[in-house]
Amino acid sequence: MNVVYFAWVRERIGLPSEQIETNATTVADLVSELSAKEERYAAAFQDTSALRVALDQELADFSSALDGVREVAFFPPMTGG
């Protein structure tokens, strides 16, 4: 699965994206798995209310299933102007 990070999430983790192997069944499970990986991931996912997620470029929520998903993207909320 390809995991993509944008804006300050990318800055905290230090990577724009990465290919991972996971047993996670939901986005929340994936966040828990990544957070346990290293301190920089824990810092990035500390407050999930400040994050949005997209699964295969479609907005989703943290309870969404990962079955068949090829790409997960994490980013801060978008603002208009």
Image: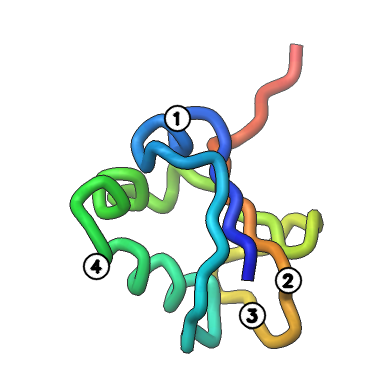
Q: Earlier in the sequence, mark 3 or mark 1?
A: 1
Residue at x-position 26% and y-position 46%: 40
Q: Is residue 61 above or below residue 66?
A: above
- Residue 9: percent from the left, percent from the top? 45, 38
Residue behind mark 3: 66
Q: Earlier in the sequence, mark 2 or mark 1?
A: 1
Q: Is residue 66 above or below residue 36?
A: below
Is label 2 or label 1 in front? 2
In the visual, does 8 lie left or right of 61? left
- Under mark 1, the amino acid is Trp
Label 4 neighbour load within 10 Å: few <14, some 14-19, many 20+: few
Residue behind mark 2: 70
Evaluate if marks 3 and 1 touch, with contact meaning CB atoms under 8 Å apart: no
Residue at x-position 75% and y-position 84%: 68
- Under mark 3, the amino acid is Leu
Evaluate if marks 2 and 3 touch, with contact meaning CB atoms under 8 Å apart: no
- Residue 33: percent from the left, percent from the top? 35, 73
Q: Earlier in the sequence, mark 4 or mark 1?
A: 1
Q: CA distance from mark 4 to mark 1?
A: 19 Å
* Image quarter in which the C terminus is found: top right
Give the secondary structure at mark 4.
helix
- Under mark 2, the amino acid is Arg
Label 3 neighbour load within 10 Å: few <14, some 14-19, many 20+: many
Label 2 neighbour load within 10 Å: few <14, some 14-19, many 20+: few
Residue behind mark 1: 8
Give the secondary structure at mark 3.
loop
Residue at x-position 45% and y-position 30%: 8
In the visual, does 34 lie left or right of 15? left
Q: Earlier in the sequence, mark 2 or mark 4?
A: 4
Residue behind mark 4: 36
